[in-house]
Image (cartoon, helix red, strand yellow):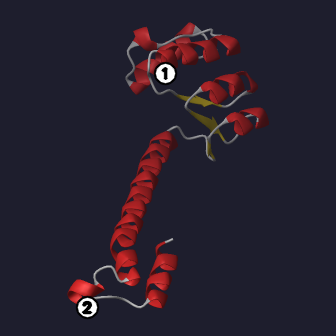
């Protein structure tokens, strides 16, 4: 979805391997946001990359808006991610990095849940009558602080 002319959009689409039927050109800023909203109503998750004032509404409408660092300040403010350099390859880096961050968050969450499900009952003495196994509450508190 671009405000650029047909020949520019088709050349870029060919260069990056997009099907030309997926390309829209000469789209006004309000049309970009409407097109994104239509895709979202179909259940699709939409990312938008832009750099100008004319992209700000679409960047805000998208599930993930990415602004190029040399773009207009309003586009930078509307975006979820700002790519510091004007290198579109960094879009892939941002996607990979966000995936790694989400995996790390889940790993930390599972560790904390595992800890809380095992160490807290041990510190409370739940197993002590049966196994004489327990940990000192101060150690459990320290471990809980470290798990956060």
| Residue sticking out furthest to the right | 73
Q: Nearer the viewer, mark 1 or mark 2?
A: 2
- Pick whichever, 146 or 30, lies toward us: 146
Compared to residue 30, the image places residue 121 above or below, namely below
Q: Which x, y percent locates residue 24? A: 53, 10
* Image quarter of residue 100: bottom left
Q: At x 21% / y 87%, what residue is drawn?
A: 131
- Pick whichever, 62 or 116, lies toward us: 116
Q: Which x, y percent locates residue 14? A: 41, 19
In what element is the residue under mark 1? Answer: helix
Q: Quadrant of the N terminus?
A: top right
Q: CA distance from mark 1 to mark 2?
A: 70 Å
Q: At x 29% / y 86%, what residue is drawn?
A: 128
Q: Which x, y percent locates residue 132? A: 25, 91
Image disc number at residue 82: none
Question: Is residue 4 in view?
Answer: no
Compared to residue 85, the image places residue 126 above or below, namely below
Compared to residue 6, the image places residue 55 above or below, namely below
Q: How many marks?
A: 2
| Of pointers 1 and 2, the one earlier in the residue sequence | 1
Q: Mark 1: give few (<14), some (14-19) or many (20+) Cα within 10 Å.
A: few
Q: At x 44% / y 22%, what residue is drawn?
A: 44
Answer with left or right where residue 131 lies relative to residue 71: left
Answer with left or right where residue 54 lies relative to residue 129: right
Answer with left or right where residue 93 lies relative to residue 128: right
Question: Is residue 48 in view?
Answer: yes
Image disc number at residue 132: 2
- Pick whichever, 90 or 60, lies toward us: 60
Label 1 sits on residue = 12
Q: Which x, y percent locates residue 76? A: 71, 38
């Amino acid at each position: 979805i671009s405000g650029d002319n047909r020949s520019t959009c088709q050349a870029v689409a060919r260069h990056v391997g997009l099907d030309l039927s997926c390309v829209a050109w000469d789209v006004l800023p309000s049309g970009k946001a409407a097109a994104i909203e239509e895709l979202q109503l179909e259940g699709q998750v939409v990312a938008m990359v832009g750099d100008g004032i004319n992209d700000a509404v679409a960047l805000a409408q998208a599930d993930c808006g990415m602004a190029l660092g040399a773009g207009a300040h309003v586009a930078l403010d509307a975006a979820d991610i700002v790519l510091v350099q004007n290198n579109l390859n960094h879009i892939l880096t941002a996607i990979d990095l966000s995936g790694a961050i989400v995996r790390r968050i889940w790993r930390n969450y599972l560790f904390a849940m595992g800890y809380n499900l095992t160490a807290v009952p041990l510190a409370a003495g739940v197993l002590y009558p049966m196994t004489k196994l327990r940990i000192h509450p101060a150690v459990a508190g320290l471990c809980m602080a470290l798990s956060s």
